[in-house]
Image (tube, rainbow, N blue to C red):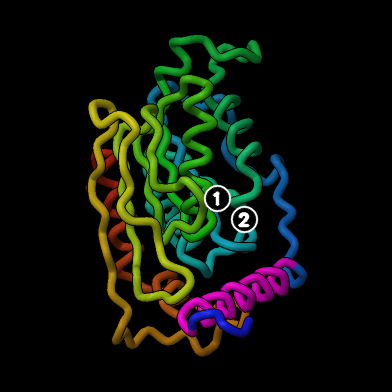
Amino acid sequence: MAGVAEPIRSRLVLILMFIAAATASSCILRSGQQYRHFSTATPIAQDDTLILGFMGGRDSWNNTVVGVGRIARSLRERDLPGVHVETVENQKRNLAVRLVRSALDTNRDGQLQSAERLQASIVVYGQSFGGAAVVKFARQLDALDIPILLTIQVDSVGRGDGLIPPNVRAAANIYQDNGHLIRGEAPIRAVDPTRTRILGNFRFDYADSPIDVSDLPWYKTLARIAHAKMDRDPKVWNKVEKLILDALGGG
C-alpha cells in the first residue's frame, strides 16, 4: 500500500476491520427466523395497524435488548387496540412481505384486491442494516401497490437507502455522523415529494457522549463506537416511539 495517502490508507484499514468484525459476528450468531415465529393472527381487521421493526446487523428477531426489540416490547406493553407488532431479521424481508399479504387478505382467497391493498396501515422502522431493510422492504411493497403509513430509519447502513419510494406517506431519518466508518444515511429524499412527506433528518451527536458500551462484544464496537452508542441512546428510541404513536394518532 506504499504511496497511498495516509487518510485513504486509514480508511481502507477500517473497512477491512469492519469486514472482519461482520464476518465474526456472522459466525457467532446465525439468524434463523421463520414465518411461524410471527404472532399476528391473519388476516387483521380492516382498521388495524401492522408495525414491523427490522433488526440491525445479525441480531435475532427475538432480541429485546437492542433498540428495535426494546421499542417492539414497549409498544406491545402499551396494548394498543388494533395494533400488531412484529420484529424481523433484516435478511428476512420476504417473510415480512408474506406476513403483509396474509394480513391484508381479508377474504382469504390468496390474492390482494385493490380494496384490500388500500386498507393497509403499516409502520416500518429499523436500525443499521435494518434501516436499509426498511427502504428495500418499502420498495417491495411499492411493487405490490401496498401503501405504507410511516417509515423510520435509525443510523441506516446500506446502498440506496436515502431514496424513499412513493408508496410511503411519511418518512423520518435518525442518524449520527461521528463515526469514522459507520454513519447513518443523510439526508433521505422522496422519489415523489407530492406523495411522501419527509418528517425530518434528525442528527444526534456522540462526540462527547457518556453512553457506556464497554460491555458489548468487540465486533459490536470495532470502528463503530458512535453507531453502538446510538443503539443505546434512550433519546433516540423515545423519538422513534413518539413518531410511531403520532402516526397512530396517539402521540
Q: Is residue 146 above or below residue 196?
A: above
Q: Which residue is mark 1?
A: 87
Would you say residue 29 is visible in this rendering?
Answer: yes
Task: Determine the residue positioned at 51% across, 89% down.
Answer: 214
Kind of residue indicated by mark 2: Trp
* CA neighbours of label 2 inside 10 A, class few (<14), some (14 to 19), many (20+): many
Q: Nearer the viewer, residue 44 or 58?
A: 58
Residue at 28% over, 74% down = 205
**Which amino acid type is shown beneath numbered disc 1?**
Thr
Q: Nearer the viewer, residue 37 or 151?
A: 151
Labelled pair 2, 1 in contact (Cβ < 8 Å): yes
Q: Residue at x 64, y 60 (%)?
A: 60
Residue 54: x, y in percent?
53, 51
Q: Position of residue 44 (x, y in %)?
A: 51, 27
- Disc assigned to residue 61: 2
Q: Is residue 237 left or right of residue 106?
A: left
Relative horizontal placement of residue 61, taking residue 150 as reference (left or right): right
